[in-house]
Amino acid sequence: MKKIAYPQFKETLFRTKLDNGLTVNLLPRTGFHKNYAILTINYGAIDTVYHDQQGKEHAIPAGTAHFLEHKLFEKEDHDAFDIFGDYGADANAFTSFTKTSFMFSTTSDLKKCLNVLLDFVQEPYFSEQTVEKEKGIIGEEISMYDDDVDWQLFFGMLRNLYPQDPLNTDIAGTKETIAQINAQTLYDVYREFYRPENMDLFVVGGFDPAEVLETIASNQAGKEQHNSPQPPVQNNFLAASGSKIERLTSKKMNVTRPKSMVGVKGLQPVSPGKAGLKYKLSLELGLYLLFGESSQLFQELYQAGIVDDSFSYELEIERGYHFAVVSADTAHYQEMEQAVVKTFKHAADLLQNAVKQLALAKKEYLGQYIQAQNSLESIANSYEGNLFGQTTVLDQAALIQEISLADVLAAISQLCDPQVLSIYRILPEG
Amino acid sequence: MKISNGVDLTLKPTKKFKTNRILVSFTTNISTPQEITARTLLADLLESTCQKWPTQRDVAMKLSDLYGASFGTSVSRYGQVYGINFIINVVNDNFLPGQTNLLQEAFAFLRELIFAPQIKNGQFDSEIFGIQKSNLKDYLHSLTDNKQGKALTKMNALYFRDQLQQIPPVGQADDVASLDEFKLAEYYQKMLNEDQVQIVVSGDVTETQVKEAVAELPFAARQVKPLTLLYSQQSEHEIRIRNEYEKVSQSKLNLAYNLPVELNSAKRYAAMVFNEAFGGSALSLLFQNVREKNSLAYYAESDLDLFRQELWVQTGIQAQNKDQVLRLVNEQLKQLQAGQLDAGLLEKIKLGLINSYISRTDNQSTALSRALSSRLLGKEVSESEWVAQVAAVQVADVAQIAQGADLQAVYFLSGGDEPA
């Protein structure tokens, strides 16, 4: 086990790669009753192609990653929730565009729960009957998100920025695409992506790392894993469509207040490893200075009654794509959009002399990253595998202190290309 | 410990976290719906600016200077008691470079925000008041944009007979117009001088440190008032039914039940187990039957608020399945009333509750909220007692609670075909 110490934060992280390729991260926390484990597969909704055993490519129906996540819990004669229930453990799962994660938290029987987690994810069972039954449940999940205004706003922006990419479809798919899924689809996709070398396990809580590692290692050694001949998952870069974006679209919904979002699409691939993390943190700081609570812009728009506390920004950097968005719920959406677009266009100029503000922002972020360490989930979920060189919030807290104004300016200049700005609105009906 | 009359301090020392967390809570009984909304506006005004930091931006920069301190105000309802809470979370000095004393500074910050708002000549600054008032009105109006939230609010309005209990704890848009700069300043004085005050501090701190820091807050002694906490209402014979139509993709079917269980009695543990078995977890009867067996919903869940003796069920379904879902929900309740609960399932449900109770002690805000509710209830329950009480619940206890559940209101937000 590799031991990574963070003396400033009094933490030690243990990492190893098992013989079958599974990466394991263990972070013991003294004094904690709870243990949290998350098993992540580097496979999500943007991965739209699989290979059959002859190596031939096939298209995956939209929503399959999410469907597979749902169906792995159910086995021929039991449900994984039920087994976790024997230990009082709380289990869950989620699917994003680039990842599928299964997790549990428990205050007792950690080792048994780890076996349950690894077994239910690594021993698939699908039948036509249970697959059909799930379509009603997921159909309702899709309906629920159809009515979720913030989700619709976000997806409207994704469709604008990535009109020709898999990001243009909801993670859960549509009622039409999930109708195409059957048990064989799930087995095929499972075989391609659920390989130990394409997974990682992060465990954090009050435990002894050597003992926990032994449990995991013996569980994995006892399993016949398909050592697939398939190539590793591709890091498909999804900005190939470049500046072919929708610049302004809108949708009417049954809402009282308009919502608007301004987005900018990252056109350059993000460097792998720590360099990528540095780019991310530089952007975070830059966007905070431009659009955060202590920004000049927010203060002006707020004082003028154009926006309220719903004004916010978000940066997403994932495998294959990245973008930033700024949004608000406001009747004065046009004024908001103009001001945000103007700020994006002049971002580098606006930050040129922000030495003092940057120092304050770094203080803010250092404190926030230390606060995040209180939460077992925040630590484990901050691990992004190879995307950022296997770093966590512990590395972020250390790295943020090294970022200079030049780094921020370079990152912001790279992202804020006026050619790829887009606006999406949700407007009240009538 | 007592700071002065009506002002109490609870200290929860722990080395588990990297932060120190402070709660200052103002609680009171109130008598008009307007006051609920007024207190939300007050919480917004006191959170955003003060004399020393007159704009949001000034406050935000001060918080950055305190190493990204997290600060916010909120309002809450515990039965008939209404709270305004100030919470600030600061990093423990041990994890920061250089010399800092963030605990002391956090209290100094609170002093400015709580004791020196922008009030002059008995009224809030008009410009600041105008912005916050307009923002609150827009916010309260937009709550119906969240359909699940809307259905819950409508269900409560239908279920409760007391006017105050009918409206959400954040108030209602219609009451905003009646508020002005003078009235809010009066509500502020009332809160500051008459509300019962609880200060709770959790972190790696000593009593001496905390006492010294708390001295930053110049609280005057006040009359100690026993607050009326619990709300209950008699069951009515007739079930209240309301159907509304809206152009939505998913319909919402909500049911509210009277659940006459005393919060301070041992029965509350059986009530929690009952709720968990009925619809409070993925192992529950509602989840298993409405979702897993019949594929009728993505969510079908129950929850309870013993401060108000209310149990409710929320589901998101297709309109044409309404009767089937109603029937299934009733069947699950009947099953529990008849004591048909598998012994193995009961054990899992209890273990799950205990696990989540203990897990929450790993969250620093739990120490604050538990200290506050112990204060309100006038009773402290130790962790071991809580666990023992839940473990002792038997099938017959669950059945007894289920038998007390009395359906009172059914609210349906229909997304089906528009009525002619």
Image (cartoon, coloured by chain):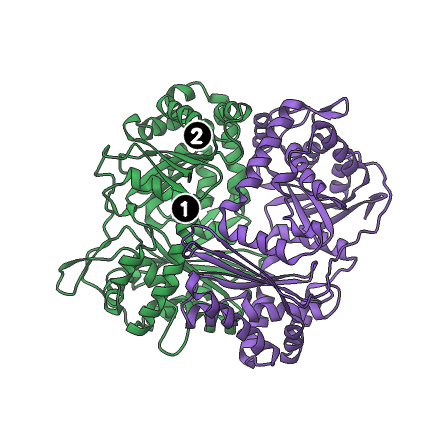
| Residue A105 in view, yes or no | no
Along the polypeptide, which appears first: circle 2 or circle 1? 1
- The chain containing the residue under callout 1 comes to A
Q: Colour of chain B?
A: purple
Q: Tell me, yes or no, if residue B45 can be seen here.
A: yes
Q: Is residue A156 left or right of residue B278?
A: left
- Residue where numbered disc 2 is placed: A333
- Seen from the viewer's position, the closer of residues B14 and B68 is B68
Residue B149 vertical position relative to residue B175 in the rendered view, above or below? below
Q: Is residue B210 above or below residue A111?
A: above
- The quarter of the rendered structure image containing the C terminus of chain B is bottom left
Q: Are marks 2 and 1 in contact (CB under 8 Å)?
A: no
The residue tagged 1 is A151
Residue B403 percent coordinates (x, y)? 65, 75
Q: Quadrant of residue A123?
A: bottom left
Q: Position of residue A286 (x, y in %)?
A: 42, 29
**In the rendered view, would you say B224 is above or below A116?**
above
Q: Amino acid at mark 2?
A: Tyr
Q: How far apart are the two marked residues, 2 and 1, measured between alpha carbons?
A: 18 Å
Chain A color in figure: green
Which residue: 40% across, 58% down? A141
- Please give left or right for residue A110 compared with residue B171 in the image: left
Residue drawn where x is 52% and y is 46% of the image = B144
